[in-house]
Every structure is written in structure tokens, then in C-alpha cells.
Image (spheres, rainbow, N blue to C red):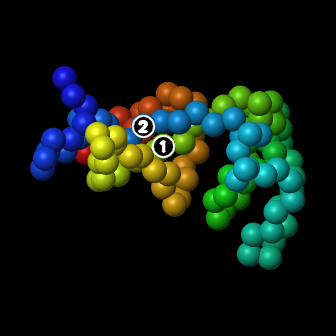
Amino acid sequence: MSHFSDKGTESKFPKVLIRPVLLYKDLNFSVGKQLFDGIEFPETIEIEGSEYTLVNFGENEISYLKSDDMDNPVYTLIYRGAQVTDGICLYSYPLNTEIFETEEAAQAKANELNNT
């Protein structure tokens, strides 16, 4: 059974796939001081006994990640493009990257998008 598009038919590949990312290996990832709308946010905060570190993954908003989880992968979604070239289905990253701390959360969102 082919997973590639035939003429005029949609690919049988899922619309959305999840991708694990080790943050410290990603060029878009940064840790530390950030200014957002002229406001400097604290590098670390504590919530209910857990320490969170200010991070950025190229998004245009403030994000904190549990400090103990910095070496663990996070998950993003990639989306199937409409173009199929030489039997290859192309996937791309969205402009507004959504980050999930667990594979289960990313898979739930991917399943939701694949069923629509």
C-alpha cells in the first residue's frame, strides 16, 4: 500500500506529526534575560515548590520551563504540506511553534488535528 499521493488524491500520511526536540541542541532556543514589551522578566520563578526557568523557543511570548526538565525533550508539531514531489510528502514547521512538555500532550493535539 502506497502512502504517497496519486493524481488528485490526498496523501494517506497524517496531516500533523509530532517531533521531539532537545532544547539545548536547537538554534532557536535561548535561556535567560528577555525583554517583552519593554518589561524584563525574572530568569527564574518558583511555583508550588518547583523552580521554573525563563526560556524562549523563537516565539513572541514569555515561557517558563521546569528547571529540572531542561535536559528532557519537549515536543512540537509539524504539518503536512499540500505538495508531493517525486513521491515524497513534505512537512513543515508552523510560524507559531507550539511547545508541549510531554509526548502524550503533543500526540493528543496531533490526533485532534488529524481527525478534523
Residue 86 percent coordinates (x, y): 30, 43
The quadrant of the picture occupied by the N terminus is top left
Q: Which residue is mark 1?
A: 77
Q: Quadrant of residue 13?
A: top left
Asked if the residue at tag 1 contacts the one at tag 2, i.e. Cβ–Cβ closer than 8 Å, the answer is yes
- Label 2 environment density (alpha carbons within 10 Å; few <14, some 14–19, many ≥20): many
Where is residue 59? Give x, y as percent: 64, 59
Q: Which residue is mark 2?
A: 17
Q: Please name whichever residue, 46 or 68, is drawn nearer the observer in this view of the structure.
A: 68
Can you name the residue that lies furthest to the left here?
8
In the rendered structure, the answer to whether residue 34 lies left or right of residue 20 reads: right
- The quarter of the rendered structure image containing the C terminus is top left
Disc 1: CA contacts within 10 A as few (<14), some (14-19) or many (>=20): many
Residue at the bottom extreme of this rendering: 38
Could you tell me which residue is drawn at 35 percent across and 35 percent down? 111
Where is residue 112? Give x, y as percent. Answer: 34, 39
Q: Amino acid at mark 1?
A: Leu
Q: CA distance from mark 2 to mark 1?
A: 6 Å
Check the image and name the residue furthest to the front.
86
Q: Residue furthest top?
A: 1
Residue nearest the viewer, comparing 46 with 9: 9
- One can see residue 115 in this view: no
Query: Is label 1 in a helix, a strand or a loop?
Result: strand
Q: Mark 2 or mark 1: which comes first in sequence? A: 2
The residue positioned 87% from the left and 59% from the top of the image is 33
Q: Nearer the viewer, residue 65 or 22?
A: 22
Kind of residue indicated by mark 2: Leu
> Callout 2: helix, strand or loop?
strand
